[in-house]
Amino acid sequence: MKLNKTLVALALSTLLLSACSDTDEKDASLTDGSQNAISGINDASTSGLKGSGLNGSEMNGGMNGSGMNGMSNGDYASTLGPEFNDPNNPLSKRTIYFMLDSSEVMPDFIPVIGAHAQYLIANPAQRVTLEGNADERGSREYNIALGEQRAKSVAGLMKAQGVSASQLDIVSYGEEKPAAFGSDEAAWERNRRVEIVYQPR
């Protein structure tokens, strides 16, 4: 048992260290060149989200990761318990946001993913769908691939903590399911996300 915990800790450490690696090491299959050209954003300008007030505790903007109408289709998290509605509990946050052209989980969201992972471990019959999304920039194919990579990044962190792969479903909507409409940075920030959607048991 001690060896198993050591392996999980080692795997989590490896994932966290890889999340801190240089963002220039991007998957070439995900980059069509249009993202950086459109935005003019480079690695030195990652303070854009910090300046916007969007972080692990504030990015939900009242949506709580449950879509614009308060509850995504099939998201039953609000019926699971009061901890999912307590704004001070990380389980109430079900949206993980990403930087432009990135599938790397930002450090602010590690505790949120960890809380959901612990809940899933404690409730092995519970399943979630990790819905990957992108903003409108880039081709449709690029955005589908990027949304999938984002969902896989969240799934990888959950699995490293002990969540069973059978509890996780991954889907990518690319740019097809925006959380915010508009062609400005405020809308794009809200659309670069993975939503953790709880399924009925």
Image (tube, grey):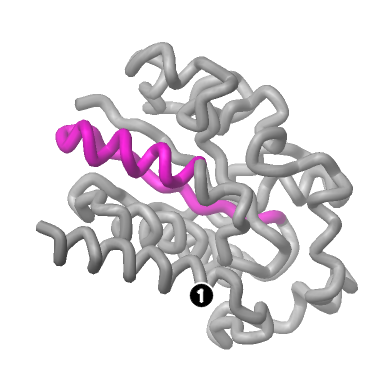
Give the answer, above or below, for where 85 lies relative to 164.
above
Quadrant where the N terminus lies?
bottom left
Q: Which amino acid type is marked by label 1?
A: Ser
- How far across and down, in percent of the image, does residue 108 sit? 62, 49
**Residue 122 falls left or right of residue 33:** left
| Residue depicted at 40% across the width and 58% down the height | 157
Crowding around mark 1 (Cα neighbors within 10 Å: few <14, some 14 to 19, many 20+) is few
Give the x, y percent position of residue 98: 64, 56
**Residue 130 lies within the magenta run:** yes
Q: Is residue 87 magenta?
A: no
Classify residue 186 as left or right of residue 5: right
* Residue at left offset 60%, top offset 64%: 143
Question: Compared with residue 194, is residue 102 higher up or lower down, i.e. above or below?
Answer: below
Q: Nearer the viewer, residue 183 or 200?
A: 200
Is residue 175 shown left or right of residue 119?
right
Residue sitting at the far left: 1
Q: How many marks?
A: 1
Tell me residue 158's x, y (percent): 35, 53
Expressed as whole percent of the image width and height from the top left, the position of residue 38 reads 85, 71
Q: Secondary structure at mark 1?
A: helix
Tell which of 131 and 102 is nearer to you.
102
Give the residue pinned by disc 1: 18
Identity of the residue furthest to the front in this view: 2
Task: Please report the bounds of the magenta region as a residue range.
Answer: 112-135
- Residue at (41%, 38%) from the top-left corner? 115
The quarter of the displayed image where residue 10 is located: bottom left
> Which part of the image, by quadrant, shows the C terminus?
top left
Q: Quadrant of residue 33?
A: bottom right
